Image (cartoon, helix red, strand yellow):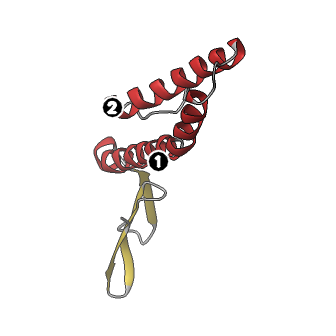
Amino acid sequence: MSARTYSGGLLVEEWDDDARTYGWADADGGWQTRAYDEDEAAPLVEADKEDAQESTRASLLEKVDAAIEADLAYLELSPPTTAQAVAQVARLTRQTVALLRLVAQRLDDTSGT
């Protein structure tokens, strides 16, 4: 959340969360800026992390219907060929990795899924 403070109609202070900078009017009438310090940036970094994790979670869950359909189609093969069985093992391994990432909340990426 960005914020601005005015005094006498003039901007005297500004917190810019997008740029992660703090600006203020100095005593000489100039404008000073600095980057957010670690404490000021921490809530934004955490929010970015949570957004990325939610995006990963959604990406993993989007694959569910296709995985179910593929698994059901495999079960209808009578008997499956060696190539189909090998492909199914790879598919199940990717599905297992996705499930483990969801359960363990390891949502930093979707590799192996």
The image quadrant where one finds the C terminus is top right
Q: Answer with left or right where residue 66 lies relative to residue 47.
A: right
**Residue, x 43% and y 54% (percent of image)?**
20
**Residue, x 52% and y 20% (percent of image)?**
93
Q: Answer with left or right where residue 83 lies relative to residue 51.
A: right
Label 2 sits on a secondary structure element that is: helix
Q: Nearer the viewer, residue 85 or 12?
A: 85
Expressed as whole percent of the image width and height from the top left, the position of residue 48 reads 42, 48
Q: Answer with left or right where residue 102 lies relative to residue 19.
A: left
Q: Nearer the viewer, residue 61 or 74?
A: 74
Mark 2 crowdedness (10 Å alpha carbons): few <14, some 14-19, many ≥20: few
* Amino acid at dot 2: Val
**Residue, x 38% and y 45% (percent of image)?**
45
* Amino acid at dot 1: Ala
Q: Residue furthest top?
A: 82
**Residue matched to label 1:** 58
Expressed as whole percent of the image width and height from the top left, the position of residue 108 reads 45, 33
Q: Earlier in the sequence, mark 1 or mark 2?
A: 1
